[in-house]
Image (cartoon, rainbow, N blue to C red):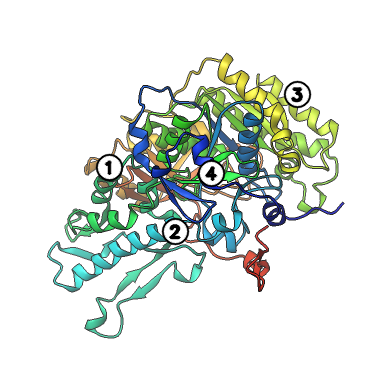
Amino acid sequence: MEFISDIEIAQSVKMIPIREVAASLGIPENDIELYGNTKCKVNYNILDRDQEKPDGKLILVTAINPTPAGEGKTTTTVGLGDALNKMGKKAVIALREPSLGPVFGIKGGAAGGGYAQVVPMEDINLHFTGDIHAIGAANNLLAAMIDNHIYQGNQLGLDVRKITWKRCMDMNDRQLRYIIDGLNGRTNGVPREDSFDITVASEVMAVLCLSKNIDDLKEKLQNIIVGYTRDNQPVTAGQLKAEGAMAALLKDALKPNLVQTLEHTPAFVHGGPFANIAHGCNSLMATRMAMRLGEYAITEAGFGADLGAEKFIDIKCRRGGLTPSAVVIVASIRALKHNGGVPRKALGKENLAALEKGIPNLLKHIENITVKFGLPAVVAINRFPTDTEAELQLVEEKCRQLGVKAALSEVWARGGEGGINLAQEVIKLTEGETSRFRFAYESELPLKGKIETIAQEIYGAEGVDYSPDALKELSRLESFGLGKLPVCMAKTQYSLTDDPKKLGRPEGFRITVRGVRASAGAGFVVALTGDIMTMPGLPKVPSAESIDVDSAGVISGLF
């Protein structure tokens, strides 16, 4: 059987004018800024109106640890929103923005799949409305002001060996991880070691995503620590007088982007792709807007529940005062068999033994959501044509033993219609179960205590080992009064451990924290574990090799 590609499906569907999508949410036309006929930005000041109106129910979509076999988290998020609207519910979706680096590297696109996509998918996957460019520009403006300050006399006494602020670009480029710049004479700057992050790992991305308005944005930008003096005192963007200009570059990027699904369900796509490096959620503003305008707000967090969901809850919900009504945990039979040790080429064959070996990964994520965070959950089994009834029944039975329902999701093949069963279970959870919502840790816990709680309770580690540099930095950040901030764990997405090769539900392992850095503007501390990189590289055969555009301007190869 021959399947047409995601981009061919997306290009075959006629979109309705985005004005009509906005109008269906009750957004006045003077509160939208059009980017053509199919996408727009929405004035965030609408959140200050009609505050007596109750917010819609917040549904978080997360997943097992991702595998090359695919889980379908974004696809499920989109399909669930479509299904709820099919059932007469007013659902609004809030997704993360794709990043060019992964699109041209390993992903090839990130706007859902099959008949559960957000459109215009080419625009969303490429330049969209320019948000990520604006974030990169603001980031690099600050970098330029740091080095200019040093060149112009360095009144603040920045130690060039202790500058922590990195330049960034939205492309996977390992060549830029560690560089030396400012060479070839005094007029070209002061020579120093430097480095690049991918734009979406920049603190500016997190600042944008966690800001409530322009004033909050400026305050957060002001608090960014860019480096340290010779006597180890922090220097901030505010001391460099950079926050105003940075905010000016970000003022339009702060406004959530509104698009639609293939079935015309409203979807906010705004910020926050990387959950293994950064906080990994779409913007707080977009999520709040979806809740304000819909009966159900369907949002996703990046990668598995050990990363994205944990950060969504412990960072975003804490900051925004959000309480999810229910959680959807996405899994596929193929991905579970991969966790059970089956090679990718053999995933289409029934293998109950391997499936049983891989299911503990799913069960750990269920345990985290229902026990550790106290939230009602349903498992969405993203169905593939090769799944057998025996395999599906095995997963359903294992979930049932933990008191969680498993619902088949066929949204990739059937769109909203294929998500009705899942939507029915979500509605039951939001109307029937009482949330016992809690965070993984309290704010008063020291930074090491927070790291160790996440490692032991969420990952299942025996403990945490720290490099001398990490211990030193933790102590220093505590002394600066940053000890009450939440922790953002930078860890591989492929495993519950910090080793991507350890699949399933490993036991008896330890997490290694090799570095720590302050994201004081964003309001969290980043703990770098294992070999995680903040600037990815391209694979041997990057997706870019398959992407093309014809003489009529039609793009191909984006999935």
Q: Secondary structure at mark 2?
A: loop
Label 1: how many Cα within 10 Å (few below 14, some 14–19, many 20+): some
Q: Are marks 1 and 3 in contact (CB under 8 Å)?
A: no
Label 4: how many Cα within 10 Å (few below 14, some 14–19, many 20+): many
Q: Could you tell me residue 172's position as x and y percent?
A: 52, 64
Residue at 48% in and 45% down:
280
In three-dimensional space, the C-alpha distance between marks 2 and 3, rounded to whole angstroms, equals: 46 Å
Return the disc, 2 or 1, that comes first in the chain's sequence: 2
Check disc 1 and report the residue beneath it.
216
Q: Could you tell me residue 210's position as x and y percent?
A: 37, 42
- Left or right, 423 with respect to 38, comes to right
Disc 4 marks a residue whose amino acid type is Gly
Q: In this rendered view, identify the residue nearer to me: 296 or 393.
A: 296
Label 2: how many Cα within 10 Å (few below 14, some 14–19, many 20+): few
Q: Are marks 2 and 3 in contact (CB under 8 Å)?
A: no
Return the disc, 2 or 3, that comes first in the chain's sequence: 2
Q: Which is closer to the viewer, label 2 or label 3?
A: 2
Return the disc, 4 or 3, that comes first in the chain's sequence: 4
In three-dimensional space, the C-alpha distance between marks 1 and 3, rounded to whole angstroms, equals: 48 Å
Q: Which is closer to the viewer, label 4 or label 1?
A: 1
Q: In this rendered view, identify the residue nearer to me: 559 or 376.
A: 559
In three-dimensional space, the C-alpha distance between marks 2 and 1, rounded to whole angstroms, equals: 21 Å
